Image (tube, grey):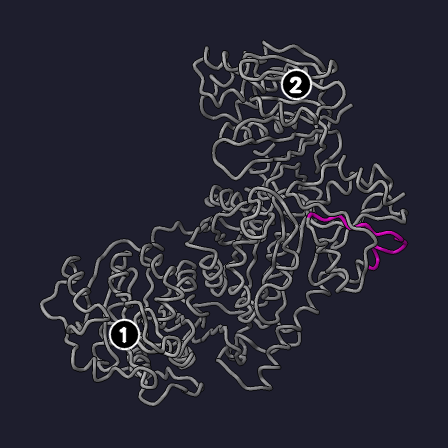
Amino acid sequence: MNDYSILIGGKAGFGIDKSGIVLGRFLNRLGLRVYIYRDYPSIIRGGHTFSIIRVSKERIATHKNKVDFILALNQDTFNFHKDRLKDDPVIIYDSDSVKLEGLSDKVRPVAIPIAKIVKEEGASEIMRNTCMIGAFAKTAGIKWELLESVFRKEFARETELNLKVARRGYDEAKELLKMEPISQGILPLLSGNQAVGLGLVKAGLNTYISYPMTPTSPILHYLAEVADDFGLKVIHPESEIGVILMSLGFSYMGKKVAMGTSGGGFCLMTEGLSFAGMSELPIVIVIGQRPGPSTGLPTYSAQTELHFVLNAGQGEFTRFIVAPGDTEEAYFWSAQALNLSWKYQIPSIILTDKNLGEGVFNFDINSIPDVKEELPLLWDRKSPYKRYLNTESGVSPLAFVPEKETVIKVNSYEHDESGITTEEAALSALMSEKRLRKEKYLQEELGKFNTVKTYGNKGSQSALLCWGSNKGVCVEAAASLGLKVIQLLALWPFPVKQFQEAIKGVKKLVCVESNATGQLSRLLKISGFNVNEQVLKYDGRPFSLDELEERIRGMVK
Amino acid sequence: MSQINLGTYSQNTWCPGCGNFAILSAVKAVLGELNAEGLPLENIVLVSGIGCHAKIVDYVNVNSFYSIHGRATPAAEGIKLADPKVKVIVFAGDGDAYGEGIEHLIFAAKRNIDITLIIHNNRVYGLTTGQYTPTSPLGFKGRSTPAGTLEPPLNPLEVMLASGATFLGRGTSHGIELLKRLFKEAIMHKGFSLVDVLQVCVTYYNMYEYYDKRVYELKEHNPLDYNQALNKIREWDYNNSSPIALGAFYKKEIPAFEQKFPEPGAAAADRDQKIKDLLKASV
């Protein structure tokens, strides 16, 4: 058996999140494939934080409710999660602060006096994690040398002390099983947010502007960290309104720019979005969904902004909306969203969520079709420049300031080809048609891409339909139940032809979404399609594999 | 002076006697002068908000960014940061800059980003036909406050001084020579500059006579002295009937925001290798 789930938990501020990632990296080095679910409250200290690290021989992108290991650094971890234990589970706990009560005989407890060890070594309290990881390594039968090399990489500060504390934990534990290394290439581990950032950079991002908001702040942090490597400008202005207007200024100057936010921040951006539509200034917005309305559950996940982003902003204009489902798609489509926004001079929206953004997945760059920075349509300098030249495709050639003896005017009012305000009736209709005509060409171009993907048993008459981060759980559940999966990547313009192709032979379409009203079902209805069943979840938590299997089993028999 | 034609084919729709004409003439004259002195016109971007003032960008044949209400400032900041050699001149109304957009104005001043704001401060909403603005005097009877406003005005220059602006001046639409001097000085100033123009709306709030009686030009004033500047800025609070000083109140030379930004260095060719390196580090 190679499929294990490990839960590590403790108080917020105790380094649980970092420990989850170190554990994930450590197991990744065995050649196992890794997925990490991170669950934390919207507070800096206290409360309960946990991560579930799931490993398998195959690629995975979802967690299971039932776990094989619980690593309990406090009593809450034991109390809250003891029901998750499977048959024959292991619980490693800090015997100085956790009391195990009411456990079945099948559970194998590993008591480690973590508080005592940390005190004896003169280590800080946060190193309790280190001690726990050491104990886990021994329990899982993993060689000390591997742990040591991961620790040397992960802990630049106090490396020796960390190693000493980990070794004490290692020596204190006993080996209960053997997690064997697997001989397959080791893949990097990335969060969805990191993959989005790298994809944008790949397609030539010049500037990233963002106001911090969970769950996309990590893109801001990541790009700020690597800004020097890529010659990026990374700016954190006064508000999301400042973010989008500043971005439009960069875009006007020919600089490729992207922003990140969540639903609440996007509320503030909508006047700027509409301005981008009217002025035909290309911008990219990453929206990490989380449950609302309003502040909602800030650190949890949802798929509730589909119709918001479809309809945001006054007036009618062309926009591109894409929802990647894993790190590879996040990378590829973030790059394409930037390219497409410049090719058509439209806003592109990358719809992610907390599960994709902050979840940690393997990333295989070799599985991604090559994606490059593309040049937008540029002015040929042969005729006098008109920023809004009315062309067949609706796309006007671009020129950027400073351009000798050339005046470049953009305008939020209705305007003529030169960008001068107009209220003339025929011209207003013409310019509106010009802007909307771009959608047809964009839709045609999207036909070149895999915007509707299918997985699983392609002959099955029952199919799960999903979008965004539910891809991973749907693909795995369908595999075990013998179903087909249809995943929608491009949500607007709606990929009608590709979708028609994908549902051929399907008699029962089950739409799986993380919202209460079935937003994708509603979009399908507008586009002329119907689903047969809905599986909805709206408690902020992702579907686990076991939960989804249970909910769909009866529907598809 | 300048021989170049800075006009456009756009028909001017300001009311006869509107104070905006003085601003338009002064700006055109200054742009002509700067051009004659060697500043290429293509290195200039005009930015405006929404309101009567904003039509000015349609009337000047120079690069322009016609923004939305209250949001001229952040767009101007983006333009400046994208290419620091470009001169960015922002036109905004009092409702626009001091009302809906004051957050951005305060932050732009705080950053000391090198952009110039010219505020068409007529102290009334013109385009929406006569409501009070952040600088209307207490008791102003507008269409949304028929019994008079219940709140005193902001002193925008005092707010800007406190926020970190490094050039502050005031003129009126009855003093075009002073406007030209102030605009030029503000544009050439390296840092955040703002000129509050007491521009008169002849239709909804005709203050020509009121201003003509009270204005005087600053003399023997040291704009490098913060306390002198503050005292002069506080003399008239946009509400009382004190004398109204005109001229450059404050000037300070410190590094501008965009100068502190690292210039992008990495070429696209490096990009793929750097991505590979980052991925290798993520194993």
Which amino acid type is shown beneath numbered disc 2?
Answer: Ile
Residue B143 in the image: state x and y as whole percent.
Answer: 39, 79
The reply to whether label 2 and label 1 mark residues of one chain is no
- Residue A56 vs residue A417: left or right? right
Residue B126 in the image: state x and y as whole percent.
Answer: 38, 80
Which of the two residues, A399 or B175, is positioned nearer the viewer here? B175
- Residue A112 vs residue A407: left or right? right
Task: Give the residues in magenta.
Answer: A500-514
Q: Quadrant of the N terminus of chain B?
A: bottom left
- Residue A147 vs residue B71: left or right? right
Q: Is residue B60 visible?
A: no
Q: Badge 1: few (under 14), some or many (20 or more) residues near its Cα, within 10 Å?
A: many
Which of the two residues, A364 or A154, is positioned nearer the viewer here? A154
Query: How far, Cα to Cα, is label 2 from label 1?
Result: 73 Å
Query: Is A381 located above or below residue A140 in the figure?
Result: below
Which amino acid type is shown beneath numbered disc 1?
Answer: Val
Chain of the residue under the numbered disc 2 shown in the image: A
The residue carrying mark 2 is A91
For residue B48, what is the image quadrant?
A: bottom left
Which residue appears at 62% of the width and 37% of the height? A360
> Per the image, is A502 magenta?
yes
Residue B169 in the image: state x and y as whole percent.
Answer: 23, 68
> Per the image, is A304 magenta?
no
The residue carrying mark 1 is B197
Q: Badge 2: few (under 14), some or many (20 or more) residues near its Cα, within 10 Å?
A: many
